[in-house]
Amino acid sequence: MKIKTARVIVTCPGRNFVTLKIETDEGVYGIGDATLNGREKAVASYLEDHVAPILIGRDARRIEDIWQFLYRGAYWRRGPVTMTAISAVDTALWDIKAKAAGMPLYQLLGGASRDRVLVYGHANGADIEATVDEVGRYMSLGYKAIRAQSGIPGVKGAYGVARGKMYYEPADAAAPTETVWDTTAYLNFAPKLFERLREAHGPVIELLHDIHHRLTPIEAARLGKAFEPFRLFWMEDPTPAENQEAFRLIRQHTVTPIALGEVFNSIHDCRTLLEEQLIDYIRATVAHAGGITQLRRIADLAGLYHVRTGCHGATDLSPVTMGAALHFDLWVPNFGIQEYMMHTEETDAVFPHAYSFDDGYLHPGEAPGHGVDIDEKRAAKHPYDPKQLPVARLTDGSMWNW
Ligand code: GCO
Ligand code: MG
C-alpha cells in the first residue's frame, strides 16, 4: 500500500485548522490534524515543502518506520512545528491502517478498556456569580467534570473568560491582544471562586482550574494549599515547565493534583515530572506530541508512576484530534479525563465525525479509522484568516506568560 499523495488543507470555519490528507494507491486515505494555533503556516510549509515530497511512494503500513524516518531524519529533533507535522502524518497513517483493517482505531490499539470517556467542559463567567451559574448550566447538560474560570476584579482580559459567548476563543486578532496580569489580585481571588462553587454545587461535582502558566513555583504552592479544602480534580499549568525540577517545590507543599503538558511535544519534556511523580495528569495529546505513536509511549511511562492521562482538547485542536484522542482514551489503561470544548456547527460541518456526547461522556463511535473526515468543498469556502494568541503583561508593563 503506497502513499500516492500527501496534501495540506488549510481552512477557517470560524477558526484556523490545518489538515493533512494522505491518499494511497489502494484508494484508502487518512487524515491528521496539523494545527498549531497562531503558527499554522509554519507547519503547513513544513509538511508541504519538506515532508510530503519524501512520503510519496512509501509503504503507508510502516507507521513506526515513517515516524522514525521523519524524527531522526530531520536531524533537528523535537520542537512544536516539527512534532505537529510528524503528529499529522502519524494520525493519518493510523487512520489508514484502521480503515484498511475495517476496525475503529481503538480496536487496533488493543480494544476498549472502558465503555465511555469521561470529559470536562469549560464554564466561565465575568465574575464569581456568573461562573457559579455557568457551572450549574454545565451540570444540567450532564457534565460530571467542569473547568471553572472567572473574570477577576481589576484584571483586564483574565484567561479563559469568553466575551458574550459560551466558549472563549483566545486567538482573536492578527496582532496579539495585550492583556494585563495581576498575580496578587488572582491569588486573593481564586480560592474564593472555589469556596463559592462548593457552597453552591456541593462536594460531588469534579471541578478543574487552569492557571495557564501565570505563577512562580512558590506562588503555585501557596495557591495549591489554599485550594485544598475545595478538593479540585486538578490545577493545570501552575507554572511554566521548562524546568521540570521546579515542580518538586510545589509538590512539597500541596496535595492539590497537578495537570501539565498541553504544550509538550516530546516524551523528554515530561520524563523527570513522571519519574519523580511530580504531576498527576499528563495533558499531551495526539496533535502536538508525536501522534498516537509517541503519545502511547508517554502514557506507558506515566502509568509506571500512577500518572493518568488528561488530553488537551481545546477548540484550536480540530475534530480530527478529538476523534483520534477519543480512540486513544477508550484504550489507554491509565486514563484520567479528556478535555472537551465543543466545536462550532461550522467546524463540525467541515469535519463530519463519528464521536458523540452523552451524559458527561464521549464515545469515539464504531466507524473504521478514527472516524473523522474532512469535507473539502466546504473547507474551501473558508479561507485562512491570520490570528494570533494574546500576550500578557504585568501591571508595570513587563512581559509575562500568557
Ligand atoms: C486548555 C488550554 C487552551 C490553550 C489553547 C492555546 O487548557 O484548553 O489552555 O485553552 O490556551 O489551546 O492555543
Ligand atoms: Mg490549559
Image (tube, helix red, strand yellow):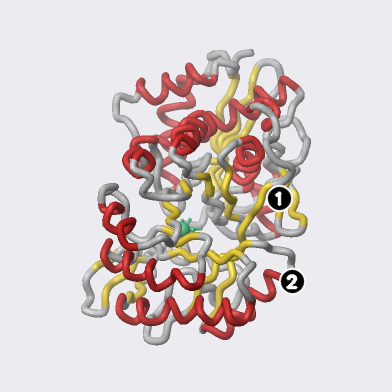
- Looking at the picture, which amino acid does disc 1 mark? Leu
Q: Which residue is mark 1?
A: 362
Q: Badge 2: few (under 14), some or many (20 or more) residues near its Cα, within 10 Å?
A: few
Between discs 2 and 1, the one toward the N terminus? 2
> Where, quadrant-wise, is the C terminus in this rendering?
bottom left
- Secondary structure under the numbered disc 2 in the rendered image: helix
Tell me what residue is drawn at x 65 percent, y 59 percent: 342
Residue at x 34%, y 36% (from the top left corner): 268
Q: Is residue 122 above or below residue 29?
A: below
Side of 2 where 87 appears, left or right: left
Image spot of residue 214 (x, y percent):
33, 66
Q: Residue 371 vs residue 244: left or right?
A: right
The disc at residue 140 is 2
Q: Is mark 2 within 8 Å of ligand 1?
A: no
345, above or below 56, in the image: below
Few, some or many residues within 10 Å of mark 1 (<14, 14–19, 20+): many
- Residue 273 image offset from top left, x and y in percent: 35, 44
Q: Which mark is residue 242?
A: none
Name the residue at 78% across, 36% down: 366
Which residue occupies the foreground of this view, 260 or 191?
191
Distance from the alpha carbon under mark 2 to that under mark 1: 16 Å
